[in-house]
Image: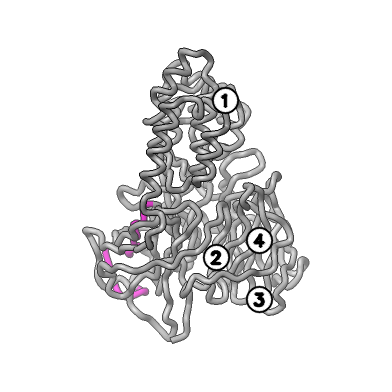
Amino acid sequence: MMFRLSMESVGSIWSLANATMNYDLASACVPVITASFETICRRVDFFSSTEPHYLAMLLSRGCRLGEVDETLKLRAISSWLDAAPSAEDQKLRADVFERLLSTVDLKKVSREFVLDLSASGCVLSRSEECREHLTNAQSEAWKCFDAPTAVSLKPCADHITGGFTRRGNITDTIYALGRDRESSDVQVIVKLPPPQLQADRNVSVRVPYRDACAVAVFDDSIYMLGGSDDNRDATNQVDRINPLDGSVSSVPSMTLPRRRPSAAATDRHLLVFGGDNGLWLASCEAFDSITNQWTVLPDMPTPRSASAAVNVPDVGVVVVGGWDASMRFSNRAELLAGSVEGENDCSWTRLVSMLDARLCPAVAFFQGRVVVAGGNDYGSITFECLPLNPGGPHPGQWTRLATPQLLDAWPLSLAVFRERLLLAKADGEVWECFPAPGPSESPSAWGSSFDESSWRPLFKVENISKPKLLVLPQLS
C-alpha cells in the first residue's frame, strides 16, 4: 500500500474495503483496528458497514487479535447485530451469528457477562435463535472449567537432545508463563524440565491473570506490573509471584498507572518504562528491593506503549519498539545508562533505529548483541540484532537474522538459558538458536557466526497460549 493508515482514516478505508469486497484492502486495516479495537468498536458506523465474512476475518485468531479480550469480541458481535441498517440485513446477520460465535473462546467469557447480555434488550437477546446458539456454545465451553489443568510438554519432531546442559555454579530454572486455555482469568506457570526435555506431564501452578501488564523476573520471583484492572482502566498495581507454589504478594504500587509498559531487571532494581493510561507515557521508574520504594527516572526520549526492554550488563537497559503517540509502530532503540539511585544519576541515549518498526517485540541480550524478534507486522515476522559492548560508544548497526521456518505466530518470547538462546511462539512451540553450521555444546562455537545462525524446534508446551519464557537463577 502507498499510504499509511491511521485511526482517523481506517474507518473510511474499512468501509470502502467492505463495499468493494477488496480483501487486500481489508487485510491492511486489521493491524490498526486490532491496536485500537475497543475504541473502534464504539463506532456504530464501523459495524453498520461491516460484511459478515470480513467481521469473521477480523475476529478470527488468524488475524492476530490475540491481544483483544474474548468478552470484547462477543460484545463486538452483539454491536454488529444491533447496527444492521435494515430489517432484512438484521435477519441476514442473525443467520450467520453461530459462525461468528465460533471465533470467540467462550471459556474466557464469564457467565455473568453472558447473562447480562442476554437480558440487555439487544438484538442478540431478542432473537430466540441467537440466544439458543449462545447458551449452548457457552455450556459446552464451560464443561471442564473446574477441572485441574495439566500441562503436557511434547518434543517436536526435530527434537535436539542435549540442548540444555548445566554450566558453572548457577543452576538456572526456566519457566513458561502463559494464559490458561481453560479459563479467562488464570495464568499457568510451568517449570520446564531440562536437561532431558522428554515428554512430561505436570500439574500446573495457577495464578491470577491481569491483562496488558509487564512481566519480569526479579529477586527470584516473577513480577506483574501495571496492566488493566477489572474495569479495563490502567492500574499501578504490582504483584510478586512465587513460581514454586503460585502464591501472590503485594509490592508497593508504581507512581503512575500504566497499561502495556515494558520492564527489565538489574541486580538491585526493577525498572518500568512508558505505557499508556489515556496518554502515551515517557515516564519511567525503578523499584529498589532494599528500600522497598519506587524512584522516578528521567523520561524516555519518545513516549510509547507496548515496547520491550532488556538489561545489558555493564552497559544499561535498552528499550526497543512500541506504539508511539501518533499510533504508529516505532523502530526506536534507546539506552538508559548510569546509576538509577536518583533521577539525575542516569541518562538516555538514542541508539541507531531498528530496521523494522515493532509492537510488543521479543528481546534478549545474547553473545554481546541485543536480539529483537517479531512485532514488526501481522504477516511477516523478522529478527535483527545490534552489538553492544561495555565502555561504548555504540555506533553499531542492526543486522538482519535468520527467521525460523513456519514462524507465523505472534507474540513471541526470547530468553537466554544456560548460554542458549530460546524462542517461544504463541502456540507454545519452543525453538533454540544454533551457530552455523549446526548444534554445538561449546559457547565459543558462536564466534562471528551469529548472523548465519539457524533455529531448531525443541518441544511444545501444551494447554497454555502465548507463553513467556522466564529464567530464574538459583544457587546450586
Number of numbered tags placed on the structure image: 4
| Amino acid residing under circle 1 | Gly
The label on residue 289 is 3
Q: CA distance from mark 4 to mark 1?
A: 34 Å
Q: Residue at x 43, y 43 (%)?
A: 106
- Circle 4 crowding by C-alpha within 10 Å: few under 14, some 14–19, many from 20: many
Magenta range is 427-444
Q: CA distance from mark 4 to mark 2?
A: 14 Å
Which of disc 4 and disc 3 is earlier in sequence? 4
Is 94 left, or right, of 220 in this rendering?
Answer: left
Which of disc 2 and disc 3 is earlier in sequence? 2
Q: Where, by quadrant of the figure, is residue 155 drawn?
A: bottom left
| Amino acid residing under circle 3 | Ser
The x and y percentages for residue 455 are 32, 58
Which of disc 1 and disc 3 is earlier in sequence? 1
The x and y percentages for residue 224 are 57, 62
Q: CA distance from mark 3 to mark 2?
A: 14 Å
Q: Residue at x 52, y 73 (%)?
A: 242
Q: Which residue is mark 4?
A: 237
Q: CA distance from mark 3 to mark 4?
A: 16 Å
Q: Are marks 3 and 4 in contact (CB under 8 Å)?
A: no
Which one is closest to the eye, mark 4 or mark 1? 4
